Image: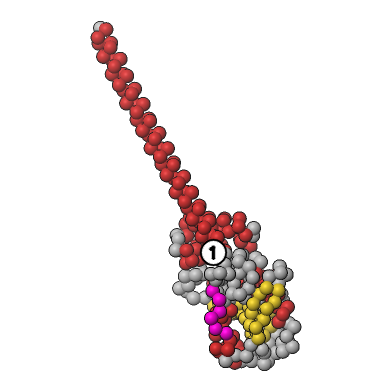
Amino acid sequence: MPLLFGRRTNAASSIQKTESNTVKTRRKLLLGTVAICVVIAAAVMARARTEAHRLITNPAATRKLPRITPAQFQLPFDEVLITNVDGLRLAGWYVPSRNRAAILAQHGLKMTREEMLPAAAALYRHGYGVLLCSVRAHDRSDGEQITFGVREVRDLEAWYHYLVTRPDVDPGRIGALGNSMGGSLVIQFAAGNTNIKAVAADSPFSSLDDTVATSVTHYTGLPAFPFARLMLFWAKLETGCDLSQVNAKVWIRQLSPRPILLMQGGADTTVSSQSGARLFAAAG
């Protein structure tokens, strides 16, 4: 009996040891999995922060600059340098008006006023003056941080005040034209300035939220999930701006009954291809 009892005790002990080892193995696996997840999450957050910083900054040392001037399009022009309310200097070109009407022409994200030269040439042939604007952190203008319109609208306000001082311009005959981010920006500006009599927007984003997935993939090559929302989070922290304010669907409602022309390509990889339709529906 003692021998039999001892065997039973040894068997029970063996089972307990096995169960204990299994628990320890599972615990190690769980801790290892958690550690791997933490490392991956930290890497994703760090990459999102890096890409957000890269997207919202445009250092003067590396940004695009105009390679040509209106002269290459046989256009008369003035080099213009103004200062906005934030004390930043902004660079532009002004092509004089021959019919007393003028257009503010606004480039897109990380582009230059050169982008608007073909449109300026066409407008000038029809008599219009054209102010080819640049905003902060672009072209040869001051600043390095981009807020997608939250602060840039002040730059367009400064350009507008310059334009109405031109002796060749009738202040009652001013319109605005913009491409991509510039398209959203001119919609935003016209919503707050009823003296802008007409707007043309080429591929404007309907809101930053609407296009962030498309734009993040275009500019970074990263998948929209989880990077789009994370990049917005880091961009808000860095800029101090609520970028959800960037919503042209709200602004465009305020333009009526002024005319607006919306242009949107169905295969656009930079801005959500649905942006134009959303803006058209919101415009009423």
Residue 6 seen in this snapshot: yes
Picture coordinates of residue 257, whole percent (x, y): 68, 78
Picture coordinates of residue 231, whole percent (x, y): 53, 58
Q: Residue at x 66, y 75 (%)?
A: 90
> Relative to 170, is 54 on the left or the right?
left
Depth check: give the residue in front, 52 or 2. 52
Q: Secondary structure at mark 1?
A: helix
Classify 29 as above or below 146: above
Picture coordinates of residue 278, whole percent (x, y): 56, 69
The amino acid marked with disc number 1 is Leu
Say whether residue 73 is magenta: no
Classify 18 as above or below 223: above
> Relative to 2, is 282 on the left or the right?
right
Q: Residue at x 70, y 77 (%)?
A: 82
Q: Residue furthest top?
A: 1
Say whether residue 66 is magenta: yes
Classify 70 as above or below 63: below
The quadrant of the rendering that contains the N terminus is top left
Please state the extent of the stretch shown in magenta in the rendering. 64-69
The quadrant of the rendering that contains the C terminus is bottom right
Picture coordinates of residue 169, whole percent (x, y): 71, 87
Quadrant of the rendered image containing residue 98: bottom right
Which residue is label 1 attached to? 55
Q: Residue furthest front?
A: 61
